[in-house]
Image (spheres, helix red, strand yellow):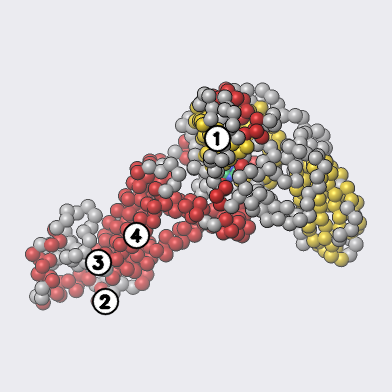
């Protein structure tokens, strides 16, 4: 026991942290039962993603790459922990301050949860129960540490708060305002005073055992949350999917599409290496048995497709290179895959698209939306509702149970993952997620090329050196790639084959005779419409970066 009831700083912080952990731990299983997006911690993170200005998001993507979400979640948890510790510090002064702090934080969580797309009043439950549990834990911890309101000498078993202290949740109001309480606000007798002082001296052991109890509650809550979330069931259902054979197999990949040069991006990007870009803080894990896709809006026959419906239809295979509008010149957010799925145009034609409709507004389980030009999807290209990627059931990261893939458009206007609705509409009536955030409503892919070899900053031996990379102009096709060194003449690289105009093409120049010194290598592509990519630099926003990829190396 320590002296005179003053709490050491660590005890205050511990009390706050454990109370916070109990709040989070209790809200988790409730959210698992209600819905994942009703978990306030993630809702606050999601809201932060949606509210963050475009420049901040671009900075985060540039600074943290695909780890940006982990960084954000860690950030949210760090803020939570700091607030929890502060709550503890306030609570040891006066329980009411601590409770107010928890309530304020609960209000932030509620606001985030209730403003998520598709939120209902029931979504408040995880936050409310979590905050109530946190409040209860806070007062319990204080009491066990003998830092809280002292129990009344007359009523040891049922320790009550001082008059005016917020009642502990779960107790009948009024019990603390009896005659004893009134007495304690008068001039208390010496015996009462002594008893109170004794009880208020810090009980370290009491706090630690209570803290262990709180941690156990939080841990059990977290484990129950995992069990109840159904993520495991969704994963199991995904593993159980048997992919049908394609009714229309992909065009054969010509020999020589993959030059198999070590360090050069392979023609097909393995799923584990495929870039991931989305706004989802936690990857949605959708059980295909609960999933449906609604075709709504300007159609004669609105429809609803189940996963079994999709799998029962003739499936088409197509090789398509997907890239992100946020990809800087030379950046990594591009990959090529073999997709298997239903032709989106068939589904739309069955529904009967109205004349005058020019936009497909697709929505994912997490509320993200995407606007795709209808004419592009209907012009005969292999626009798919994909269920598989590179011979594997769509990975959860890439949109299981189904996603859209449209050759020739950046992902933000075409590639909705975890898609649940396609509304046929008009660009002058509807707006997709990124449009009010500073990105163009339409996003055709710009002709681009990238140097994979040599690596920037490489130190190379003098002599013959391989320069190689990829170039893309989806749905137009790449016709030529040229390379120059130190601003010299442009030289034609050798282009690898490609099955269609919808994928990237590898290229190589293998006779550069590197002399000692520093050299800058640049590349440019020309697409099948005869247009050469511009050297003029443009940032990624609003509709994709331009400029030439340049790599500087040292030969020594
Ligand atoms: N549901 C959902 N789908 C989405 C996004 C998203 O944020 N949410 N981002 C899009 C963007 S910007 C891109 S570039 C592609 C990336 O697909 P990938 O992660 O499978 O590579 O997904 C698209 N589909
Ligand atoms: Mo993107």
State the separation of the CA atoms marked 4 and 3: 20 Å
Query: In x, y percent, where is residue 381?
Result: 69, 31
Q: Are marks 4 and 3 in contact (CB under 8 Å)?
A: no
Q: Mark 3 falls on what kind of element? A: loop
According to the picture, the residue beneath numbered tag 4 turns out to be 104
Q: Is residue 160 left or right of residue 249?
A: left
Residue labelled 4 has its Cβ within 8 Å of some atom of ligand 1: no
Q: Is residue 354 visible?
A: yes
Number of other residues with Cα within 10 Å of mark 1, as a class: few under 14, some 14 to 19, many 20 or more:
many
Quarter of the rendered image showing ligand 1: top right
- Quadrant where the C terminus lies? bottom right
- Quadrant where the N terminus lies? bottom left
- Per the rendering, the mark at residue 3 is 2
Residue found 67% across the figure and 41% down from its top: 409
According to the picture, the residue beneath numbered tag 3 turns out to be 148
State the separation of the CA atoms marked 2 and 3: 15 Å
Mark 2 vs 1, N-terminal side: 2
Tag in front: 2 or 3:
3
Residue found 70% across the figure and 44% down from its top: 445
Total number of numbered labels? 4
Q: Mark 1 falls on what kind of element? A: strand
Mark 2 vs 3, N-terminal side: 2
According to the picture, the residue beneath numbered tag 1 turns out to be 425
């Amino acid at each position: 026991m320590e002296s005179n009831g003053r709490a050491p700083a660590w005890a205050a912080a511990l009390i706050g942290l454990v109370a916070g952990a109990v709040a989070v731990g209790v809200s988790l299983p409730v959210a698992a039962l209600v819905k994942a997006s009703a978990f306030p911690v993630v809702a606050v993170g999601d809201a932060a993603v949606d509210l963050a200005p475009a420049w901040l998001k671009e900075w985060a993507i540039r600074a943290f790459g695909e780890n940006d979400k982990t960084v954000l979640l860690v950030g949210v948890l760090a803020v939570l922990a700091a607030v929890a510790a502060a709550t503890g510090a306030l609570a040891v002064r006066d329980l009411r301050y601590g409770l107010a702090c928890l309530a304020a934080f609960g209000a932030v969580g509620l606001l985030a949860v209730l403003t998520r797309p598709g939120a209902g009043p029931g979504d408040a439950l995880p936050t409310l129960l979590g905050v109530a549990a946190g409040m209860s834990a806070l007062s319990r911890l204080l009491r066990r540490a003998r830092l809280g309101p002292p129990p009344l000498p007359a009523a040891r078993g049922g320790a009550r708060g001082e008059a005016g202290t917020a009642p502990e949740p779960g107790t009948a109001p009024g019990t603390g305002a009896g005659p004893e309480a009134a007495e304690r606000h008068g001039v208390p007798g010496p015996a009462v005073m002594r008893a109170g002082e004794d009880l208020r001296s810090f009980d370290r052991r009491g706090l630690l055992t209570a803290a262990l109890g709180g941690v156990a509650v939080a841990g059990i809550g977290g484990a129950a949350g995992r069990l109840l979330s159904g993520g495991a069931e969704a994963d199991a259902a995904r593993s159980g999917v048997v992919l049908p054979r394609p009714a229309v197999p992909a065009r054969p990949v010509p020999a020589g599409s993959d030059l198999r040069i070590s360090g050069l991006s392979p023609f097909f990007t393995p799923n584990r290496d495929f870039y991931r870009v989305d706004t989802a803080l936690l990857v949605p894990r959708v059980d295909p048995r609960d999933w449906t896709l609604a075709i709504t809006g300007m159609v004669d026959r609105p429809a609803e497709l189940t996963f079994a419906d999709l799998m029962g239809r003739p499936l088409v295979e197509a090789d398509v290179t997907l890239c992100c509008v946020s990809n800087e010149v030379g950046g990594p957010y591009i990959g090529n895959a073999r997709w298997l799925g239903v032709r989106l145009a068939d589904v739309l034609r069955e529904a009967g698209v109205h004349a005058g409709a020019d936009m497909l507004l697709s929505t994912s389980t997490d509320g993200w939306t995407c606007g795709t030009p209808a004419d592009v999807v209907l012009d005969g290209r292999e626009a798919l509702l994909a269920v598989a990627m590179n011979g594997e059931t769509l990975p959860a990261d890439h949109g299981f149970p189904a996603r859209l893939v449209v050759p020739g458009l950046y992902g933000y206007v075409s590639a909705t993952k975890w898609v649940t609705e396609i509304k046929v509409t008009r660009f002058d009536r509807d707006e997709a997620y990124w449009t009010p955030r500073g990105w163009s409503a339409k996003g055709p892919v710009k002709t681009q090329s990238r140097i994979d070899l040599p690596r920037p900053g490489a130190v190379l031996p003098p002599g013959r050196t391989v320069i190689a990379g990829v170039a893309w102009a989806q749905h137009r096709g790449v016709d030529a790639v040229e390379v120059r060194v130190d601003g010299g003449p442009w030289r034609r690289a050798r282009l690898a084959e490609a099955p269609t105009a919808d994928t990237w093409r590898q290229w190589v120049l293998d006779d550069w005779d590197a002399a000692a010194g520093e050299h800058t290598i640049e590349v440019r592509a020309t697409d099948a419409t005869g247009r050469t990519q511009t050297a003029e630099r443009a940032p990624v926003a609003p509709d994709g970066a331009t400029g030439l990829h340049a790599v500087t190396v040292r030969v020594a």
